[in-house]
Image (cartoon, rainbow, N blue to C red):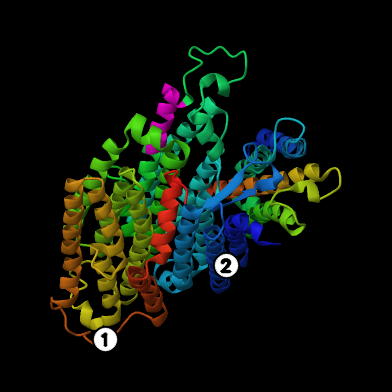
Amino acid sequence: MNLEQLPILQVILPLLAAPCCLLLRRSRLAWGFAVLVSCSSLLIAATQLHIIHHSASGSISYEIGGWAAPWGIEYRLDRLGGLVLLVLTAIAAVTLSVARRLLQEEVPEERHHLFFATFLLCLAGLSGIVSTGDLFNVFVFLEIASLSSYVLISMGRSRRALVAAFQYLVMGTIGSTFILIGIGLAYMMTGTLNMADLAQRLTMTLDSVYAEGASIENPALPVNQTRTILAAFAFLTVGLALKLALFPLHAWLPNAYATAPTVVSTFLAGTSTKVAYYVLLRVTFTIFGLAFTFGQVGLQFLLTPLAIMAILVASTIAIYQGDIRRILAYSSVAQIGYLVLGLSFATQAGLTAGIVHLFNHALMKSGLFLVVGCIATRQAGLTLESIRGLGRRMPLTMAAFVVGGLGLIGVPLTSGFISKWLLVSAALESGRWLVAVLVVTGSLLAVVYVWRVVEAAYFLEPDDKTTSEPHDAPAGLLAAAWVLLGATLVFGIYTDLPVGVAREAAASLMGVGS
Amino acid sequence: MKKHSILRVVAKILIPFVLLFALYVQFHGDFGPGGGFQAGVIFAAGIILYTLVFGLDTAREVCPKRVLECLVAGGLLLYGLVGTLGILLGDRFLDYSVLADHSGQHIGILLVELGVGVTVAAVVVSIFFVFVDRGRH
């Protein structure tokens, strides 16, 4: 076995580990095995990114079953995919390593092995979406990831988790159906599902794609000028916007994140919407191309206002929430706005900002949800009233929250600053002054909702002063939260990994070449 | 259902043929219409008919929960391991040509479809059992 098998191992390792967890049955055994698998996945992802970043072509390809590319299923990974895989597997590894402790309060022990099996299936699905170079394969893995995340969310402690999971299931299924219709229409017009092949055929004329002798009304028309392809593009983008929770299609997200077990919120907040963003980048840039997406269709005229609305409206809603998890969830909707804003600029700088923010926000938000998990181990309530005085009772835990909160605001020395800085400078570079002002306004709104938590934890007196002894979360949990949030500090100072890789990824997406 | 002797007798006659037909669809899948998924569903339909006529408790003795769980996992593992053999024998994932000289592709697809069939049958039966069980509490 050699390194060229890595792309497939990335996907089948968690996929085959899931049934093994089912067979292991004992909570501790299944957990140990899942941690081992997720750490190996992280190692594989890191190795792959290293290989891609130092290869001349900037991508690696793998043919499943030895069938050559446009006919067989091809796995293709470039710098963008490598970076997304790295952050995905890193969050999975950190989350799983503390999952058993967090689950103790939330899921009965005899169902732990089922939880770990489902978690690994979700990881396999998300890794598959990123690894594959085949559009239909994306749909299949999207379904694996979505179905397992519905199950994971429904395992939440309160009965509202079931409602949230069902709501997510309905919205998610509509999204998946739209994506499938889009793929079907594109396949109908081009006869191919391989992304690279699809991109090429979309720009060809109708008569060169169809067999000789087929009766076509307008043979010289390029395929991507047809109404069918326009419909395909519309279905794909709307479906992905649902999966991405782009404003105003975000309604499923806050309930799902606020009622799911904290392990699940930690994992999904950092990964699932990020992977949907990755697919959106693939569809708009790699498959349909810059000229079609932004020239012919004018997607930026739709995405820019929606992204700005997401930032302003969701941040404002976050200010009025009483539950920490709902504050963080609405903040996620706002941050997705920043991601999509970067995409909608259609410039290399904007894309770089989007990709870097994907990386940074994934670490921040997972870290923050892990802090919430830490708080949940010591007290039941997660409302702003119940965390009063928590800064004294759990000093290290709340300090971690402050670090993450500063990252969300975009304070210098945190990684949030880097991505906001890149985004604002990308906006100014392309003359979008108003957008830049609105992005900064969004950050000011973030100050308000982060401050409300900080105020409650540090400046308000608790109702009962009986438990004022410092009593932090278990050391392992706290360490995991600090690993993720510490990483946001590290990447706020040493920016080579996310920014360097993202810049070249953006260049290759724009078709500039690195 | 104890009083309905016609139903019981007809079901007893039908079930072996349903299961046999499932196996036909399973192993004839690479020459004609069919395959693992369809076969799995047909096989599960046979067991569901058995459950409807003879009751959940009897059916649980035929397919205990532990066995079903093992079959759910086992089918997927069979699929995965056949695919992984391709890697271990120095070729690509799911490349069945390494399994035998001439008929490698044939053996490969047969085993993979068997894995699909086992998992699908076990999952469909499990889902049915869960639904039937809910009404009783």
Q: Quadrant of residue A20?
A: bottom right
Quarter of the picture containing the N terminus of chain A is bottom right
| Horizontal and vertical percent position of residue A180 | 48, 35
Percent across and percent down for residue A233 are: 41, 32
Q: Main secondary structure of the magenta part?
A: helix
| Residue A299 seen in this snapshot | yes
Image position, residue B108 (x, y; %): 76, 46
For badge 2, the amino acid type reads Ser
Which label belongs to residue A358?
none
Q: Is residue A102 magenta?
A: no
Chain to which the residue tagged by mark 1 belongs: A
Q: Nearer the viewer, mark 1 or mark 2?
A: 2
**Which residue is the extreme one toward the right?**
B101
Q: Is residue B38 left or right of residue A129?
A: right
Quadrant hosting residue A321? bottom left
Q: Relative to A284, say whether B115 is above or below.
A: below
B127 sits to left or right of A146: right
Q: Which range is magenta?
A: A224-237
The residue that mark 2 highlights is A40
Residue found farthest to the bottom? A469
- Residue at image coords 46%, 41%: A286
Q: According to the image, label 1 marks what residue?
A: A470
Give the amino acid at mark 1: Pro
